[in-house]
Image: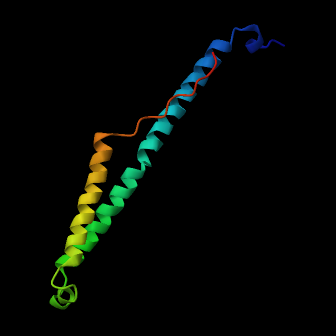
Amino acid sequence: MSDENESGRGSAPVETEYQQEVAELERRSATAARLFDIRRIIGGLFVVYGVIVTIAGFTASDADIKKAQDININLWTGIGMLILGLLFLLWLKLRPAAPPAPADTPE
């Protein structure tokens, strides 16, 4: 009955596998952090809603515009939402989320 881990002969491959597994988990964590960045979610929602409201502004009837004191409020609000959403996405592109710092592990 020989135990390789206690004798030290099999500890190096186990540590290497452990380090590879930790590196893989860190990579996945960084990918998830970038994927679920709140700027992406907010920017995407504003762009989607901005497109919908802008289309509603283009298809507004004269009666709808008259109710809003001759201002096509859907068109202007939709354009504003589009601009805000695109700014969020631009911010995300110019300053991506930093990957989380690796945890300090005792050697």
In the rendered structure, the answer to whether residue 48 lies left or right of residue 26 reads: left
Along the viewing direction, whichever of 75 and 55 lies nearer the viewer = 75
The image shows residue 74 at horizontal and vertical percentages of 23, 76
The image shows residue 37 at horizontal and vertical percentages of 42, 48
In the rendered structure, the answer to whether residue 28 lies left or right of residue 77 reads: right
The image shows residue 18 at horizontal and vertical percentages of 61, 24
Q: In this view, does 4 lie above or below 23?
A: above
Residue 58 quadrant: bottom left
Along the viewing direction, whichever of 102 and 12 lies nearer the viewer = 102
* Quarter of the image that includes the C terminus: top right
What residue lies at 24% left-to-right and 65% top-to-bottom? 80
Along the viewing direction, whichever of 47 and 73 lies nearer the viewer = 73
What residue lies at 30% left-to-right and 46% top-to-bottom? 91
Furthest-right residue in this view: 1
Q: Is residue 42 above or below residue 23?
A: below
In the rendered structure, the answer to whether residue 5 lies left or right of residue 63 reads: right
Along the viewing direction, whichever of 71 and 26 lies nearer the viewer = 71
Residue 99 quadrant: top left
Furthest-front residue in this view: 69
* Quarter of the image that includes the N terminus: top right
What residue lies at 44% left-to-right and 40% top-to-bottom? 31
